[in-house]
Image (cartoon, grey):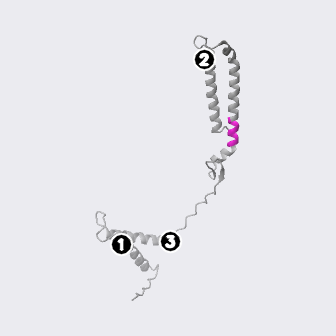
Amino acid sequence: MASKIDKLIDKAEETNQAIRDLAFAVAKVPQKTVPLPPIVRGLLPAAQATNQFLADTYFDTARAIADVILPADVAREVINNPNVLMDANGSISQIPARPAAAKPRKVTKKMRQQRKIQSNAFRNANAKARKQDGTLRAGYDQQRIALMAQRECTKERQRLGLCEKPKKRKSKK
């Protein structure tokens, strides 16, 4: 399987061959359209062979350099492996694999109950703090809504026996 650089070199070689064929076809046209001295006309076959040799040598060298710089197996590894990284200098380095995603925590019955209590508390606090059109009443903000909901949540948990009443703090005087 040819790599992209090999395909690119093949395309460049085909284009170069087409240009050389066109140049020599123009040079072989009768003298009236392209005046060439007889010595030059006699050297055209040798020039064509030399040009072909130079082009073959150039493209073979380009392929060899491409294989040295980026061998096909290494290129395939770099492209297909998300843990392999090639920097701007061309050096290849291994990056650590990402850890597998942690298994989601199991939701217990108590957690579901707490979530339901809290969602109801926030729904009630929001309903109390908002007008019919959805704007906040005067004196209410998100902080006050959250505090009201947390108080209601605590009272509901105490009512259901999920937590004990908190001890009162002694005030400092």
Q: Does residue 117 lie above or below 54 as drawn? A: below
The residue indicated by pointer 3 is 109
- Please tell me which residue is depicted at 66% across the width and 47% down the height of the picture: 77
Instruction: Tell which of 113 and 56 is nearer to you.
Output: 56
- Please tell me which residue is depicted at 39% across the width and 70% down the height of the picture: 120
Q: Does residue 119 lie above or below 86 as drawn? A: below
Q: Does residue 136 lie above or below 68 as drawn? A: below
Report the predominant secondary structure element of the magenta stretch.
helix
Residue 57 drawn at (x, y percent)? 71, 30
The residue indicated by pointer 2 is 26
Instruction: Tell which of 78 and 21 is nearer to you.
Output: 21
- Marks 2 and 1 sit apart, C-alpha to C-alpha, by 90 Å
Circle 1 crowding by C-alpha within 10 Å: few under 14, some 14–19, many from 20: some
- The label shown at residue 41 is none
Q: Residue 59 sits in which quadrant?
A: top right
Circle 3 crowding by C-alpha within 10 Å: few under 14, some 14–19, many from 20: few
Q: Is residue 33 left or right of residue 65?
A: left
Chain-order first, disc 2 or disc 1? 2
- Marks 3 and 1 sit apart, C-alpha to C-alpha, by 29 Å
Circle 1 sits in a helix, a strand or a loop, which is it?
helix
The question of residue 67 being in magenta is answered with: yes
The question of residue 137 being in magenta is answered with: no
| Amino acid bearing label 3 | Lys
Residue 54 drawn at (x, y percent)? 69, 28
The residue indicated by pointer 1 is 144
- Please tell me which residue is depicted at 37% across the width and 74% down the height of the picture: 148
Look at the numbered discs 2 and 3 and tell me whether their residues touch, using CB distance below 8 Å.
no
| Amino acid bearing label 1 | Arg
Magenta residue span: 62-69
- Please tell me which residue is depicted at 71% across the width and 37% down the height of the picture: 64
Q: Quadrant of the C terminus?
A: bottom left
